[in-house]
Amino acid sequence: MSYMKKIITFSAAAFLAGTFAVTGSAQTTERGDKAEKRAERPAGKGMQRGGFGRGLRGFRGGVLRRHGGLGLRGIDLTDAQKVQINAIREANRPDEGLREEMRSIMQSRRMGTLTEAQQERAKAIREIQRAKAENVRAQIEAVLTPEQKQTLEDRRKVMQERMEQRRQQMMERRQQWQQRRQSGEKPVEN
């Protein structure tokens, strides 16, 4: 290779390396953007598992999807039924004061500073919410036709059977794990 070609090749390589370095450093990673957004959110906000809003969060779209957490997904509701169910939901929204109180109790539990009084209060809050949920369920079932109620009941039975099967599978796995542990066998990696 001639001297001139070597200089041109070296210059082009240096130019490309500099270009890649500049463009690479200018980009922010998606992970960094998510971390920044997460830091900007107030504490306790966002998609969470469990809690009082479980089943109603995360559903997007039309009215039927909104009621998916109530077990009504796929049931053909009339427009009047949709309006009545929306009114029932609005009238029985979770109490923000109870949610905040429960959130602080759960934070104490995570920190290991949960007192006996807080445990009792958590039980009382759960009972209030359970009673409220039963009341909502009864109000919604009063809106449904007998055929819709039967469909809902059939689905609940199927769901209970599935849950029982999963519970049995989990118990079997737990027993197998304990037997392997007692025999000194190493656990199987999945």
Image (spheres, rainbow, N blue to C red):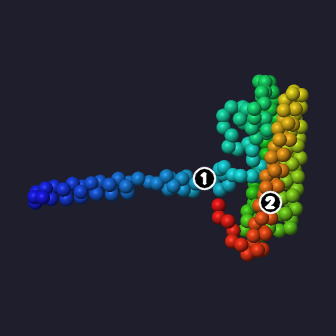
Q: Position of residue 20 (x, y in %)?
A: 32, 55
Q: Is residue 14 visible?
A: yes
Decide: is 117 above or below 63: below
Percent from the top left, x then y, of residue 185? 71, 72
**Taking the image as drawn, is residue 97 in sight?**
no
Residue at the location (77% across, 49% down)?
52
Query: As drawn, which residue projects farthest toward the top?
Result: 79
Residue visible at 85% across and 54% down in the picture: 125
Mark in the foreground, 1 or 2: 2
Work out whether residue 186 or residue 70 is closer to the camera in this orientation and state it. 186
* Residue 41: assigned label: 1
Say which quarter of the image contains residue 184: bottom right
Label 1 is placed on what type of residue? Answer: Arg
The tag on residue 140 is none
Of mark 1 and mark 2, the one earlier in the sequence is 1
The amino acid at mark 2 is Glu
Helix, strand or loop under label 1: loop
Q: Quadrant of residue 44?
A: bottom right
Q: Is residue 11 left or right of residue 112?
A: left
Residue 172, label in figure = 2
On screen, 147 above or below 12? above
**Where is 157 relative to 26, above or below?**
above
Q: Quadrant of the C terminus?
A: bottom right
Helix, strand or loop under label 2: helix
Crowd class of label 1 (few under 14; some 14 to 19; many from 20; radius 10 Å): few
On the image, the x and y values in percent for residue 10 come to 19, 59
